[in-house]
Amino acid sequence: MYKLYFFFFLLLISIISCKTTEPTHPGPDPKITLSVEDVSCTGAWLNLKLENVSLPANLTIQLNNNSLNQINLLTSDSTIFIDSLLPNKNYSFKASIFQNNKSYSSENIATVTMDTTSHNFTWQKLEFGDYTSNILFDVAIIDENNIWAGGEIYLIDSTGQRDPTHYNAVHWDGLKWEVLRIPTRRVTGDITSAPIRAIYAFNKDDIWTFSDAGSYSHWDGKVWKTEYINLINGSGYKFWGTNSSDLYLGLYRGQILHYDGLNWANINTGTDLNINDIYGSWNNKTNQYDIMLVASNVLESFDRQILKISGQSVSKLNNNPIAYTLSSIWFKPNRKYYVVGAGIYEKNNLNEDNWKNNISDITTYYTYSIRGNDLNDIFVIGGFGEVLHFNGMNWKSFMSATRIEGNLYSVCIKNNLVIAVGYGSTKGIIFIGKR
């Protein structure tokens, strides 16, 4: 059975427009304009505009010439979500109302739902480091021949002993993997190679990292520039931005920094929980980026927050009925929202009362990171090497190929390439998935 959900976007609705009295006739006939905003593999978002229609109004949606349930409309501009469709199928829609003793209909509109993506990935496992305490925290894909990961790697030196000065990054140049020391700066001004927690790349000549020393490092295509940030009060966990003059950094104990190309500025979040992830996505309705983050002190408490940045202000969003910690977020505005951690939760719209945990039986492991190409191509990674893929219709676990005695902390996906990083036993781990 098809399901209907509708979300209203108010235009200019006065008190007069809410009257239920019918307009005096003769007058302009009611007009209904129906269009397709977007589709997923199993749903379609329809935009409905009404003109010369007395509100409220009962509307009927026809799917492939079959009538669905009626909707009671209160506004002249609405978004209607039709669920329970099938992937890669042709559908037609028509909207009708009955007013002034006559029936009025929109034109028939046609669309094709998204196709599912393939679960057919092959996996390669790479290990980095000697002895113990080797770990990779974050990863960035520029293209298939330019991949960066940051962390803490120890190697044997020229004498055969453990090199006391660790490395903090690995890089793939299309031919080989190289272990590197990216310079970082301590509060004292000393240059070192502190462990890198966060890494973010806009292109091959614009790469950002943040280290445990409290400093950022920026690659401009020629050299690494590193500076200690005086504003910080602890480690940084994740970058997100639109360019190097609009860059956000999520940090320890609720701190968010924004870089405008010249200066870093604090944004008050209203929480003292660690900002574990930050993500932004373009909102076609508001013509700006929606920026959201999740905060928790994993292994310290069960507290969690889901936050949204608007300019310099941060608002707390509903996280019911989530009871435990959160580590990552990914979304497409007004379409789908996911948060992961102690469970995988989803919403179609932020106005919904509760987050759903319908896929909790997919994995019993803690999940640390989620990223996607689109609604039909999403990866989640986590404890013991768990790697999950959503193809728009169903989830698949690759645990048989990726199981480790450790955790995967970050995932990045670009086209048909996915990279997950973390640690296994004593090694820094990279899993490369190719479709």
Image (tube, rainbow, N blue to C red):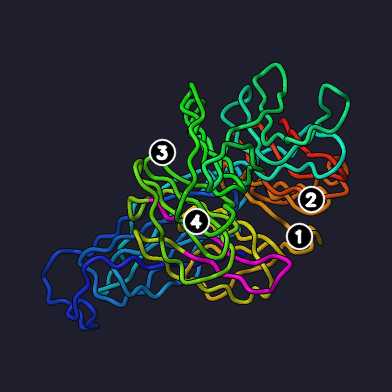
- Whether residue 407 sits left or right of residue 317 in the image: it is right
> Which residue is label 2 attached to?
407
Q: Residue at x 24, y 70 (%)?
A: 53
Q: Are marks 2 and 4 in contact (CB under 8 Å)?
A: no
Can residue 123 be seen by looking at this rendering? no
Q: Quadrant of the N terminus?
A: bottom right
Q: CA distance from mark 3 to mark 2?
A: 31 Å
**According to the image, label 3 marks what residue?**
244
Q: SS of the residue at dot 2?
A: strand
Single out the mark in the foreground, 2 or 4. 4
| Residue beneath the point at 81% across and 45% down | 133
Q: Helix, strand or loop at disc 4?
A: loop
Q: Is tag 3's residue or tag 2's residue first in the polypeptide sequence?
A: 3
Residue type, mark 3 in image: Ser
Mark 2 and mark 1 in contact? Answer it, CB < 8 Å. yes
Judge the density around disc 1: few (<14), some (14-19), many (≥20) Cα neighbours within 10 Å: many
Q: Earlier in the sequence, mark 3 or mark 4?
A: 4
- Residue 276 location (% of width, % of height): 60, 58
Mark 3 vs mark 1: which is more N-terminal? 3
